[in-house]
Amino acid sequence: MNKNRINTAFAPETRFDVRPSPPAPFRATLENEFERLKLRLLGDRLRAAETVLNAPLRRAANDAAAVAWTTLFPLLVFPALFEEKTDAAVRQAKRQARILAESRELVVTA
């Protein structure tokens, strides 16, 4: 019933100029600076700590980095978060060591 013929005409192909990509975006530069800051602070803290605290300190640094990265100024926020998280990790590790020592004493004396 509705058989209207439409004449089609195709134009020549459209070409686009390909420009070289711009230099690294600001966020990529920020990531590099952020990673250097994280590694420097973590390295300083690991050198001053016992080897038992290696894993908890690394986890704390990663947690602080994850939270800081969600802010508008991660390079500004990270050092304070890093200190808070690593201090908490050290306290937790010492508490766990104390509880383990006390529980061993309880098991030996029982």
Image (cartoon, rainbow, N blue to C red):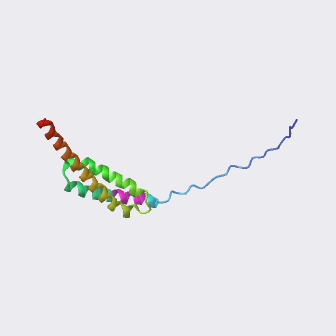
Q: Residue at x 37, y 62 (%)?
A: 77
Q: Between 72 and 13, which is closer to the camera in this rendering?
A: 72
Residue 80 position within the rendered picture, expressed as x and y whole percent measured from the top left:
33, 62
Viewport quadrant of the N terminus: top right
Q: Between 8 and 40, which is closer to the camera in this rendering?
A: 40
Tag count in the figure? Answer: 0
- Secondary structure that dominates the magenta span: helix
| Res. 26 image quadrant | bottom left
Q: Between 13 and 72, which is closer to the camera in this rendering?
A: 72
Residue 72 position within the rendered picture, expressed as x and y whole percent measured from the top left:
44, 62
Q: Residue at x 34, y 51 (%)?
A: 62
Residue 102 position within the rendered picture, expressed as x and y whole percent measured from the top left:
16, 43
Q: Residue at x 22, y 49 (%)?
A: 95
Which residue of the protein is positioned furthest toward the right in this rendering?
A: 1
Left or right relative to 38: residue 100: left
Which residue of the protein is positioned furthest toward the front in this rendering?
A: 110
Which residue of the protein is positioned furthest toward the left in this rendering?
A: 109
Left or right relative to 110: residue 73: right
Q: Residue at x 29, y 59 (%)?
A: 83
Viewport quadrant of the C terminus: top left
Vertically, is 76 above or below 49?
below
The stretch in magenta equals: 28-36
Residue 60 position within the rendered picture, expressed as x and y whole percent measured from the top left:
31, 52
